[in-house]
Every structure is written in structure tokens, then in C-alpha cells.
């Protein structure tokens, strides 16, 4: 097949995915620099190799696309919306516009990476140039390697190497104008029905999707929460975390912009340097997770440490349903699961507590929890979600030791001592004194009566005995270790 050089005035297609912003967007910036008309497109592809987004994520996506469309329209380039197979819709748009180039910011998870490579190869054969950039991570996978040339499997040395080799890209302000192509057909976002209506179970969701919302959230965090980030971030009743995860997942904000703002605040003496470093480390953990998933794609479905695929997981539909509904009888666990369902988000410390409860106390497969989080989190991210669940289960890279079993009572007492978090999400316990709040089954009958709590009626009794469940989990680990020793 012969190829032809695109006409000099042929439009450039910018294929938006999880980079829903104008500033610090390499694909858009380079497209704008060509001086040619720009055709921004978002393709809602629910099939193929890429994992379908969860319902809560779709709610955020709807708001983010509306914000992006308004920003692009105000600069002269309407956002084209298409639904269907990504390659087919790109080819249709190329035929409609005569575009000779497609610019995109790469996605690094296995399915998307493979799909994009196949599309780029097919387009190149037909004379269409497809150029990819890193607009989602601090460093692209494969650029942070050990001395022997392999990927890091432990976070601390990865962090050190990342900070040594990763260079912040020059800032790219949002273009003031973008020459577009008018008259192209586009879907109507409302027709995609990304937001629930009957019933609207997302009515309690918070946050402001879109680039402006991301900028405002980051500015507010740097001005306030960052000052005491390392001290307060573990307390779920305190607004001390950045809550940037959905903005970062959808690319409404470059991770480098978050790093730069934190470091600038430290340099100006507005926050301690150690606090900025702690926040940067959290952003680096996001990279670490993405790099691991890219380099070890099997960990999406299998234990990163293969021995753990032999864990004797339990089939416990009743326990799973109680966990999902926030009806386990352990107040801090139930508070977290109810917060997740009501808001599409959960505090990071509580994510670890509820995750440990599922895989250790109930001995339910970590993949079951990962799928529930994928469905219910607005910030559900492939690398983070999979890596963090494997970290909790003890089967991942640099994971918590399996024998570390979080005690939901002591975790609640330590990180929610005054009960503000539990009382917010488990109001049936709101009158119970702090002393009994995190273990209501230990309260004297008179205390329960005065608080208006009838265990088993108003609030469930514990669905497991934690001490017994911990021993069961440790016995399961011993069985895995014995099997490995026998195999060796």
C-alpha cells in the first residue's frame, strides 16, 4: 500500500482520554504548535481490550467532559463526542476531516497500551502519523529502572530513583485560542446516560469535576491541608487529605503541576518542606502502581507473588453483602463503606481498614474487593486499585506482611478517637459514649439502652469474632507457606 504525505493544512486530531484538561497537556500543546486546525475528540469505547469504567467513575466523567467541552468551545475548537470502537471512530473522523496526524497522551495499563499500539500501527500503514506523549504520570513506565535494568518492586528505592531521573516538563499554559473545524457530527452527551437518574444514587457525590475544579481543589489543599499533611492525613474526620485522586485519574490536572505547587509552597516558607515531600511521595506511589501494572500485566488478575494464588479464599455471600452495605457490626468499617456508597469516595486510612477486614477477617478474595471499589469509586484507577488491594492482601509488590491484620476496633479508637467519623456515617450509634463507640457489643446493657441502641435491631452485632478471624487468616497463610516449602 502506498502512503501520502498529509497536506500542510490538514487538521490534527487530538484524541482525549484521561487527560481532560487544556493546560500542561502535551498532546494538545504539540497539536496547537503545528499551526493547523485541531479536532478534539473523546470516544466513549465500552468494548475491546480496555476495562469498562465503573458506574461512579462515569458520573465524574460526565462532569469532566462537560467542563472540557465548554473550555474548548470558548477557544474555538468544539469537542467531538463519539461512541463505539475507538479505531473505527478515529478512522471515520479521519475520513471526514482529511486529518493526517493523531496526537494523544498515552495510557499505560495493559489493555489500553496494546490497543493504542495496534491503532497507531494501522494508521501509520495508511499514511496517518500517530504521536503519543506522557501526560498522565511523573515518568513513563520503563524510564525508572534498577541498576540491572529491571523494574523496581520496592517503593522506597523506586521513589529515590524517580526523583533522581524524572524531569518536570516545562509548563504549558492553556492555549488562548484553538483553531477548530466546524460542522462535524458529534454525539450529545446526555444521550450517553453517564449519570444515574432513576434513582439518582449519586445525589450525595461531592467534588467539582473538570480542570477548574482540579485547580481550585489543589490550591485549597496547598493553602491549608498540606501544612500538617503527614500528621493529619490518617484521621478520616479531618479534611487533611488532598482529595485530588479523581482529578488526577481523569487528567484534569498534571501530576507535575501538583508537585510544582507543593514544592513552590515549601520554597516560599508557606509549608514545611517535609510536608511537601510527603505529598510528592504519595504522587510517586501512584506512579509506582502504574509502572508495576504496565510491566507486570498479569497482576490485574493474579497475585503479584504467585504463591498467594493458592490462598484458600472463602465463598461468603452473606459476609460480602454485609461488608458492601456497611452492616458488619464494626463501626469504622461500616462508616467507610457507607461513605463510599453515599459519596463515591473513601478516606485513604479507612480504605486500608475496610480492605483488611474483607481479605483478613472475612478471608474473601482481594479481587472481589477490587471489583467493588472499581464500581463504586469516582477515582477508580487501574494501577492504584489493583496495587493497593494486593498491598492489603500481602500478595503485591512491597506489600504489607500478610500477618499484619488490622484490628478494626483499635484502628477506630486510634484514628477516630472522638467518634466524629463514625457518628457521621453510622448515625444509629451517635448517642453511644466514645468509650463504647468502636465496640458497641462490649457496652453494658444500660449504656446501650440510654443510647437507644438495640444490637441486632438498630445496629448489627459483629459478623465475625476478630480474634478468631485473625487466627484463621494466619492459618491460611501457613497453609500457603507450607505448600511453597513442599514445592521447593
Image (cartoon, helix red, strand yellow):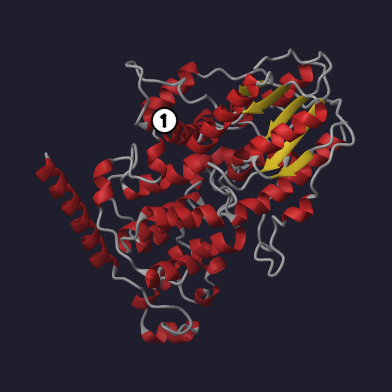
Q: Which residue sits at x=65%, y=35%?
A: 87
Q: Which residue sits at x=59%, y=20%?
A: 168
Q: Is residue 62 left or right of residue 72?
A: left
In the depicted view, which residue is nearer to us: 156 or 227?
Answer: 156
Q: Which residue sits at x=45%, y=51%?
A: 349
Residue 465 in sight here: yes
Pointer 1: what residue?
295
| Quadrant (top left/top right/bottom left/bottom right) for the C terminus | top left
User: Does 457 appear above or below 179?
Assistant: below
Q: Is residue 303 left or right of residue 295?
A: left
Q: Which residue sits at x=47%, y=65%?
A: 324
Q: Position of residue 438 (x, y in %)?
A: 41, 68
Q: Position of residue 70 (x, y in %)?
A: 83, 41
* Crowd rating for badge 1 (residues with CA inside 10 Å; few <14, some 14–19, many 20+): some
Q: Helix, strand, or loop for circle 1?
A: helix
Residue 137 in sight here: no
Amino acid at each position: 500500500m502506498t502512503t501520502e504525505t498529509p497536506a500542510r493544512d490538514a487538521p490534527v486530531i487530538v484524541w482525549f482520554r484521561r487527560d481532560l484538561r487544556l493546560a500542561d497537556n502535551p498532546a494538545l500543546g504539540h497539536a496547537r504548535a503545528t499551526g493547523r486546525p485541531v479536532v478534539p475528540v473523546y470516544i466513549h469505547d465500552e468494548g475491546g481490550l480496555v476495562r469498562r469504567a465503573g458506574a461512579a467513575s462515569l458520573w465524574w466523567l460526565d462532569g469532566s467532559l462537560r467542563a472540557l467541552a465548554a473550555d474548548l468551545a470558548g477557544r474555538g475548537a468544539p469537542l467531538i463526542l463519539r461512541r463505539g470502537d475507538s479505531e473505527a471512530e478515529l478512522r471515520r473522523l479521519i475520513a471526514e476531516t482529511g486529518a493526517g496526524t493523531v496526537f494523544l497522551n498515552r495510557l499505560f495499563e495493559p489493555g489500553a497500551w496494546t490497543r493504542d499500539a495496534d491503532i497507531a500501527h494501522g494508521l501509520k500503514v495508511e499514511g496517518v502519523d500517530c504521536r503519543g506523549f506522557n501526560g498522565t504520570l511523573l515518568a513513563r513506565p520503563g524510564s525508572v529502572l534498577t541498576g540491572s535494568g529491571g523494574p523496581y518492586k520496592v517503593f522506597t528505592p523506586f521513589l529515590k530513583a524517580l526523583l533522581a531521573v524524572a524531569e518536570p516538563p516545562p509548563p504549558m499554559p492553556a492555549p488562548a485560542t484553538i483553531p477548530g473545524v466546524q460542522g462535524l457530527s458529534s454525539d450529545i452527551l446526555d444521550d450517553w446516560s453517564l449519570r444515574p437518574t432513576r434513582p439518582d444514587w449519586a445525589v450525595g457525590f461531592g467534588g467539582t469535576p473538570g480542570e477548574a475544579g482540579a485547580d481550585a481543589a489543589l490550591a485549597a489543599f496547598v493553602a491549608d491541608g498540606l501544612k500538617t499533611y503527614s500528621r493529619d492525613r490518617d484521621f478520616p474526620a479531618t479534611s487533611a487529605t488532598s482529595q485530588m485522586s479523581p482529578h488526577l485519574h481523569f487528567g484534569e490536572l498534571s501530576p507535575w503541576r501538583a508537585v510544582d505547587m507543593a514544592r513552590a509552597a515549601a520554597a516560599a516558607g508557606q509549608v514545611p518542606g517535609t510536608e511537601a515531600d510527603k505529598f510528592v511521595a504519595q504522587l510517586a506511589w501512584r506512579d509506582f502502581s502504574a509502572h508495576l501494572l504496565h510491566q507486570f500485566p498479569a497482576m490485574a488478575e493474579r497475585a503479584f507473588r504467585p504463591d498467594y494464588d493458592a490462598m484458600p479464599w472463602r465463598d461468603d455471600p452473606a459476609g460480602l453483602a454485609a461488608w458492601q452495605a456497611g452492616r458488619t457490626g464494626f463501626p469504622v468499617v461500616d462508616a467507610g463503606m457507607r461513605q463510599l456508597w453515599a459519596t463515591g469516595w473513601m478516606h485513604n486510612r479507612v480504605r486500608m481498614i475496610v480492605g483488611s477486614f474483607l481479605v483478613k477477617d472475612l478471608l474473601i478474595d482481594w479481587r472481589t474487593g477490587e471489583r467493588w471499589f472499581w464500581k463504586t469509586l469516582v477515582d477508580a484507577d487501574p494501577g492504584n486499585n489493583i496495587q493497593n488491594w494486593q498491598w492489603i492482601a500481602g500478595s503485591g509488590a512491597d506489600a504489607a506482611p500478610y500477618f499484619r491484620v488490622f484490628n478494626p476496633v483499635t484502628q477506630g479508637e486510634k484514628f477516630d478517637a472522638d467518634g466524629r467519623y463514625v457518628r457521621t456515617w453510622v448515625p444509629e450509634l451517635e448517642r453511644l459514649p466514645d468509650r463504647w463507640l468502636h465496640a458497641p457489643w462490649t457496652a453494658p446493657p444500660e449504656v446501650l439502652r440510654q443510647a437507644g441502641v438495640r444490637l441486632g435491631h438498630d445496629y448489627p452485632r459483629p459478623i465475625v469474632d476478630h480474634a478468631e478471624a485473625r487466627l484463621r487468616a494466619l492459618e491460611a497463610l501457613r497453609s500457603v507457606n507450607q505448600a511453597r516449602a513442599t514445592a521447593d
